[in-house]
Image (cartoon, rainbow, N blue to C red):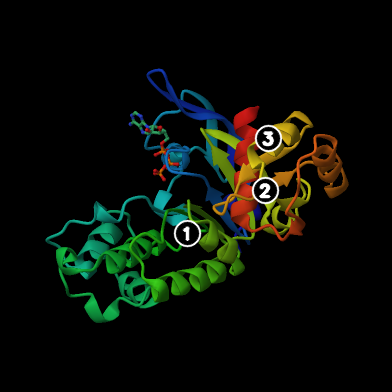
Amino acid sequence: MRSRNESVVQVRGLGKRYGDAVAVDGLTFDVPPGVVTAFLGRNGAGKSTTLRLVLGLDRPTSGSAHVGGRAYADLPTPLRTVGSLLDSAAAHPGRTARDHLRWLAASNCIPARRVADVLDLVDLAAVAGRRVRGLSLGMRQRLGIAGALLGDPPVLLLDEPTNGLDAEGIRWLRTFLRDLAREGRTVLVSSHLMGEVELTADHLLVIDRGRLLADTPLRDLLAGSAGHLLRVRSPRAGQLRDLLVADGATVTTAEDGALLVSGLPAERVSAVAAGSGVPLLELAAVERSLEDAFLALTAAGGAA
Ligand SMILES: Nc1ncnc2c1ncn2[C@@H]1O[C@H](COP(=O)(O)OP(=O)(O)OP(=O)(O)O)[C@@H](O)[C@H]1O
């Protein structure tokens, strides 16, 4: 039986600069076992850099990252503790899928019989004899996941694992990740795909410009712990937007031009509009999608 502590990822004050550019800015969080945690952020937010720092592939400028209380470099059998997928192009194109995994197993003192197990797990047994260059992007992605599982690790760190997967592959991955978490593993998956994260994750770490904006159960974020979201339409949307922001609201604009307002109750929005003679065409509470919640968070974070 694994101890819970063995599989907690702990990040403390983690920072990374490249020259003057800050890629990761003082991140502190824990990733616990038993749930799927999504590391959510736009392109360039700092997700890959953070994962690379946890995996000891890059040196932090400040702070630390530990898995089960140890830095990655100090783990006695890293692949048996942490499985990772950073780049599905990492497999040698001239090797067969099976040989790639055999090589990975041999170089990490993992019994060769485990190769057949992981090929089955990711549904690649039928193409195991194909060279990597002949595999589709989705198959290569599954091969990368097979490699991550080779050491039967309690911790999995996967960077954008849905890349290249078709709709069926994405559905497969979703169930697969949830099953791995249910087995008691720590599963951290980075993504910029809101819809996918909304369907897969239990817990969210939201990152923007290297900073942590939220560390929260998905359910709480969607329930609007940051306040109700209102959808407001007006023929003078620009003016209304300025008035609401001046009154303390956070306002983003939906694709159809409606304002998405958080931080003020509907009564106040109505009073602000009436006070300046701005007509309203619509004022309604909306169910927050993860995308709405994310936009509100990043707008608020950006203004801070
Ligand atoms: N080796 C590097 N040298 C210089 N800048 C870098 C390096 N690696 C990352 N960066 C910068 O650090 C920031 C964070 O990049 P990172 O790849 O971690 O983001 P990300 O959230 O994973 O985005 P994506 O989804 O696009 O991979 C970006 O501005 C990026 O340009």
Tell me the tag on residue 42: none
User: Dot 1, crowdedness within 10 Å: few (<14), some or many (≥20)?
Assistant: some
Looking at the rendered structure, the secondary structure element under dot 3 is helix
Query: Badges 3 and 1: C-beta atoms under 8 Å apart?
Result: no
* Disc 1 to disc 2, C-alpha distance: 43 Å
The one nearer the camera, 171 or 61, is 171
Looking at the rendered structure, the secondary structure element under dot 2 is strand
* Disc 3 to disc 1, C-alpha distance: 55 Å
Marked residue nearer the N-terminal end (3 or 1): 1
Residue 98: image location, x then y, percent: 23, 70
Residue lying at 49% horizontally and 71% vertically, measured from the top left: 176
**Can residue 282 be seen from the camera position used here?**
yes
Marked residue nearer the N-terminal end (1 or 2): 1
Residue 128: image location, x then y, percent: 23, 75
Q: Quadrant of residue 59?
A: top left
Q: Quadrant of residue 168?
A: bottom left
Query: What is the residue that sits farthest to the bottom in this orientation?
Result: 126
User: Dot 3, crowdedness within 10 Å: few (<14), some or many (≥20)?
Assistant: few
Left-right relation of 53 to 260: left
Where the C terminus falls, by quadrant? top right
The residue tagged 2 is 260
Q: Amino acid at mark 3?
A: Gln
Q: Amino acid at mark 1?
A: Pro
Where the N terminus falls, by quadrant? bottom right
Q: Amino acid at mark 2?
A: Leu
Left-right relation of 167 to 178: left
Callout 1: CB less than 8 Å from ligand 1: no
The residue tagged 3 is 239
The residue tagged 1 is 153
